[in-house]
Structures are given as structure tokens and as C-alpha cells.
Image (cartoon, rainbow, N blue to C red):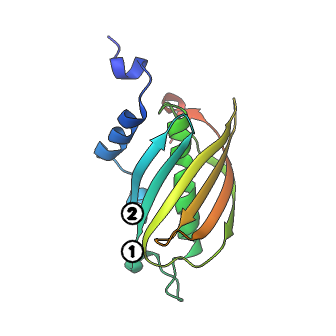
Amino acid sequence: MTDVAETEALTDEAILARFHRTKNQPTGSQTLGFHIVAVSQAEKSVEVSFDAKPELLLNPMKQIQGGYLCAMLDECMSVACMVASGMTHVAPTAEMKTTFYRPAMPGRIKGIGKVAKWGRTIAFTEGELYDAEGRLLAKATGTAVPTPFQNYKK
């Protein structure tokens, strides 16, 4: 017998609840302090937040190291792909380009991820990070390879 949840499209609320109740959050997401705030399948987008802890993520200038900001942007864009697929696909990143606008300090960082175009074999993604005052910290664009969960190889 097939589970009803597997055969029917998930609502945005159901996807958000699924993220909130997961017991298997990836350790990378945990390190970044990832928390999903909102999802929109119609807009192929997500809003997330990160708790940038000073004991884990700082460079010698006491700012969040740029590689961690890239990881945050990658997380935003990857989760947007999962939402855009109706939670049927993962989308490993093939490439991404990041532009840094200002230093990021420890604390809460808002992330926005969006799928600009979902194709048969590639997804074009966008991500943005903002500080607590709403100032743009960094932007990224990327390409990802949509892969059904059952075909994903570790």
C-alpha cells in the first residue's frame, strides 16, 4: 500500500512542518545554525535563518569567514530546490558564484533562496544573505543538478 503523503502534493505548510520536525538535520546545517522560516512552492523560494556562532565561524578579523557565508548561500539555494521539487529531489550544486557586499558579524543572519529556473537536467538558483538590520551581506548564483531522492547516491 502506498502512503498518501507520498502520492499527493505537499502544501507549503506541510513542507515547513516536515523541516521543523526532522530528527536528521545534516551536521553542516547544524554547524551553520540553520532554521527554516518560510517556504513557497509557487515562488520556488525559501526564507531561512542562521545563528552564526562566534566560537565556530569567525576569521581573524572577528567576522564570519567567507567560506561559511558561501555554505549558508549554498544551503539556501539547495533547500529552495527541494521545495521547488515538492520534496521529491535533492539538487547537488554544480557551480556557484558569490559576491560579498559587507562583512558579516556573529548573530542572526537571514537567508533567501530561490530557484530562478527549473529545467530537465539543471536548476538555476539564487541566494541572498542579510544581517539583523536588513543590510545585504552577500549574493550568489548557482547551478544545481536535480536528482530524485531515490536515485541519489552517497
Quick check: can you spot residue 35? yes
Residue 133 to residue 110: above or below: below
The tag on residue 9 is none
Q: Quadrant of residue 56?
A: bottom left
Q: Earlier in the sequence, mark 2 or mark 1?
A: 2
**Left or right for 31, reference 133:** left
Residue most extreme to the top? 1
Residue most extreme to the front? 133
3D distance between C-alphas at marks 2 and 1: 8 Å
Quick check: can you spot residue 153? no
Q: Residue at x 38, y 79 (%)?
A: 55
Q: Amino acid at mark 1?
A: Lys
Q: Quadrant of residue 96?
A: bottom right
Q: Which residue is mark 2?
A: 33
Residue 118 x %, y %? 66, 35
Q: Residue at x 47, y 67 (%)?
A: 109
Q: Amino acid at mark 2?
A: Gly
Q: Which residue is mark 1?
A: 53
Name the residue nearer the viewer: 138 or 95.
138
Residue most extreme to the bottom? 61
Q: Quadrant of residue 44?
A: top right
**Left or right for 17, reference 84:** left
Q: Residue at x 44, y 23 (%)?
A: 9
Residue 38 x %, y %? 43, 47
In which quadrant is the N terminus drawn? top left
